[in-house]
Amino acid sequence: MTGREEANGDMPPAAEYRLEDQIGFALRQAHQRATAIFNSVMAEFNVTPTQFAALVKLDDVGRVSQNELGRMTGMDPATIWGVISRLAKQGLVAQSNDPKDGRLVMLELTETGRVATTAMKTVASDVSQRTLNGLSEAETRQLLALLARLGARS
């Protein structure tokens, strides 16, 4: 008996393991579908899903530190740094040092970023509608609630 079997006596035999029944596989397939739909719907804006998330959250909260924006959007420091660097190069986000703490990089949308984000938000709900197509309203609410619970676990 392996240590894994001892820790979980009801582990199914390896022959019963099916990739298609695994949560990670199902989530990856759903994510790939959602990303393809996002890219189709949002093509005219030339942004990635992570860039869009950063823009929308900045539109929601206003001026915020780069670290805080990373936490709010679920991005690690290296990822949010890259996302913001690309958005700044496009003229959508302005970066500045916090006058009270020079170590903090503060972010806010530029006027161009505000206009672009507003335009993006007008069509973005189509991404969710198309991704969830085929689910009832109750199923959609249940799916989102369950995913939120999974995401909240550490």
Image (cartoon, grey):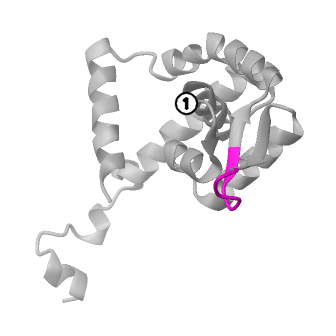
Find residue 143 and report its image quarter. top left
- In the rendered structure, the answer to whether residue 27 lies left or right of residue 122 reads left
Residue occupying the point 51% across, 23% down: 131
Residue placed farthest to the top in the image? Answer: 122
Q: Nearer the viewer, residue 8 or 102?
A: 102
| Residue 90 horizontal/vertical position (percent) | 87, 35
Q: Nearer the viewer, residue 6 or 153?
A: 153
Find residue 53 and report its image quarter. top right
Residue occupying the point 32% across, 60% down: 154
Residue occupying the point 82% across, 22% down: 112
Q: Is residue 76 magenta?
A: no
Residue occupying the point 68% across, 62% down: 103
| Residue 87 horizontal/vertical position (percent) | 79, 39
- In the rendered structure, the answer to whether residue 151 lies left or right of residue 91 reads left
Q: Nearer the viewer, residue 25 or 39?
A: 39
Q: Main secondary structure of the magenta part?
A: loop
| Residue 72 horizontal/vertical position (percent) | 50, 43
Of the 4 image quadrants, the one containing the N terminus is: bottom left
| Residue 92 horizontal/vertical position (percent) | 80, 31
- In the rendered structure, the answer to whether residue 71 lies left or right of residue 42 reads left
- Magenta region, residue range: 99-106
Q: Residues within 10 Å of mark 1 (few under 14, many from 20)?
A: few
Q: Which residue is mark 1?
A: 61
| SS type, badge 1 | helix
